[in-house]
Amino acid sequence: MSFSDDEDILQDFLVEAGEILEQLSEQLVDLEQRPDDTELLNAIFRGFHTVKGGAGFLQLNAMVDCCHVTENLFDILRNGKRAVTSELMDVVLQALDTVNNQFDAISNREEPPLAEPELIAQLERLVSCEDLTEAAVADSEPAAAAEPAPVAGADTAAAEGDISDTEFEQLLDAISDTDAAAAPAAGGGDSDEITEGEFDALLDQLHGKGKGPATGDKDAPVGTSSETGATPAEAAAGAAAASDSDEITEEEFESLLDQIHGSGRGPGGETPAAAAPGDKPPAAAAPSGEAAPPPAAKAGDDLITEDEFEDLLDQLHGKGKAPANEQDKAAATPPPAAKAPAPSAPAAKKTPPSAPPAKPPAAAAAAATAAPAKQPAARPGREGGQAGAGETTVRVDTQRLDDIMNMVGELVLVRNRLVRLGLSSNDEALGKAVANLDVVTADLQSAVMKTRMQPIKKVFGRFPRVVRDLARNLKKEINLELQGEDTDLDKNLVEALADPLVHLVRNAVDHGIELPATREANGKPRVGTVVLAAEQEGDHILLTITDDGGGMDADKLRGIAVDKGVLDEDAAQRLSDTEAYSLIFAPGFSTKKEISDVSGRGVGMDVVKTKITQLNGSIEIQSKLGEGSRIIIKVPLTLAIMPTLMIMLGEQTFALPLVSVNEIFHMDLTKSNVVDGQECVTIREKAIPIFHLKHWLVNGQFGAAVPEEAHVVIVSVGTQRVGFVVDQLIGQEEVVIKPLGKMLQGTPGMAGATITGDGTIALILDVPSMLQRYADSP
């Protein structure tokens, strides 16, 4: 297809199909745990069917083919013709991956790639209820023998999918015997006709002995019942006469109505008019006992009276429930009256010009059986259209949300400026107006931030599949529990947290959970548990990854750090257990001796630490040997507006991210000590290194005299704490992060800039990169 055509339709398809594919990924993993869940099977079937329908409308044939055969497989599964197995789920998940790849290509306006022929073949074998293992054995046989060998044994023939002439003749004999037993009334092979006795036997098989709707020739449109006293021979003779003249008499028609409705209960309760020449009876309808076709052939002029039509509808739908009555009621209101019901429209075209418009044609009587099914479906559609007009949600481009957020950020800066001016003014009216503006701006900021919020389930949804595939690969048995999936956070954070969480979950599965045999030997259940949880704590989000595996050995980590040259022996021994756990975040650090496609390179956890730091977050590890580990991540709710602690260094203003600040002291710096060449202060019997920020950040102040007393801000960097000596504390302020210009981009220690309440520019400090750049050790 040309992606430039129907762009709006394509966008709608991408949104809907994207949501369905995300749900399918979760549902397929759930299905493996609950293979007998019929509702879940139906939901997966509907998901593939919907994606196939949308792709077919856009002529995305590659996606249609893959979804179609997968949909057929789930039709087999939901009908109970095949059971859900792990091998089957491997193939289905591979098919879902293929559809996802095709979806990504379509999103990039590229032609979707075709599914692998082997995958389609496997799905078709599953649809045919074949065993994949047997098919794999057959496919693994050498294909060199294109021509059969002169002497082929039974085993060789079976392996190649061929059978001998003798076996083929036996198969034909068995089929013939089966056909003869199942259909004794099949008749001669040279004629398409069956005898009266064969037809009676067939009716007995269908309806039970003596319970057939009629007896007679297969072409007979009418039959006789015990009420009329007609014999089968008379019925056959009448049928033969009718088939010769293509006409039925009035008596035959009344007899047919008596069989269908009961004696004297025919539609209208009147004697029907004689059939006009040229009318043909519904030959195929009479044996099956259908009620709709006979009235259509009732009148010679193709018309029935209005009273007869209403009586027929009352019999079909119940007294007073006929569609005609509902139409009469709807006719009172002009808009519905303008839209005639679809089923009666085609019949109206067949009405002769001389026919009265109030009398519906006889064809409408036949269509009346289909009308009840079509009309209820049409009404919800119209109601749905009215509900759609009052839709409560609207799809908005994320760029527009970003623009609104930027404007709100500018409004926050103006608010801060006015608040500062209001505090310095003695005008009471101005103070009240500024206070009111402060409240309204805060509410507006909160409302706009909520429009950017997304549930973290968008990230959590991918992990059941990750854990499932990794556990099968590592021969482990693991149960993943998700908690707090409805916790909301900024959409940019949702996307940014995806990669770190994948590394942490994979680390818990690979390094944390033991093999089933090891767990049983240690008195644990065979199935390990990994818990991924999220919760809101103030203006931050707490994410925890917990496993009940073997835990971390701090001594082993210290030894690996020494062997890899990360630390020397003395420094490693001084590390607390919590600090030793944080060694796993060091670049190139890994507890695995062998490199695999899952772990061993020492890259994953380094990526986690770097990414969380970039998000102004923190990460902490708790572990107990033999019981398991817990990793705690703390990140802000949003990246657009940041709460900061404003400080002064000389005459310049700087902002420290409040998430990093632990506590603030006013200290006597003459009581500081020097440990290993680093100035430290003792706080609660623990030595904390301190640094004079003025020496680093203010031009010409390096090596300046140190004051005797100063404010010390204690900040957290990972699991360590350091103190920053500052000249003045201004207070807490929410700031909008502005990126630095090209000339200042990448300056160590600077995360960005903002405009303060008094209109000056303040630089936002990046604590980890600043320590890495200026301090001898963090």
Image: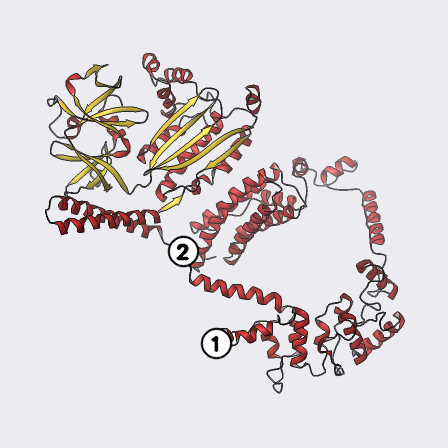
Please tell me which of labels 2 and 1 falls first in the chain: 1
Residue 490's place in the image compared with 252, above or below, is: above
Q: Nearer the viewer, residue 286 or 379?
A: 379
Residue 74, image x, y percentages: 61, 47
Residue located 39% across and 26% down the image = 621
Q: Left or right: 469 with respect to 179?
A: left
Discs 2/1, front: 1
Which amino acid type is shown beneath numbered disc 1? Pro
Residue 97 can be seen in this image? no
Residue 115's place in the image compared with 354, above or below, is: above
- Residue at numbered disc 1: 334
Q: At numbered mark 2, what does the secondary structure look like: helix, strand or loop?
A: loop
Residue lying at the far front in this picture: please name it.
Answer: 428
Residue 299, image x, y percentages: 72, 81
- Residue at numbered disc 2: 393
Task: Using the image, tell me which numbered label, if any, was put on residue 517.
Answer: none
> Which colour style is shown?
secondary structure
Q: Nearer the viewer, residue 610 or 385?
A: 385
How many labels were placed on the picture? 2
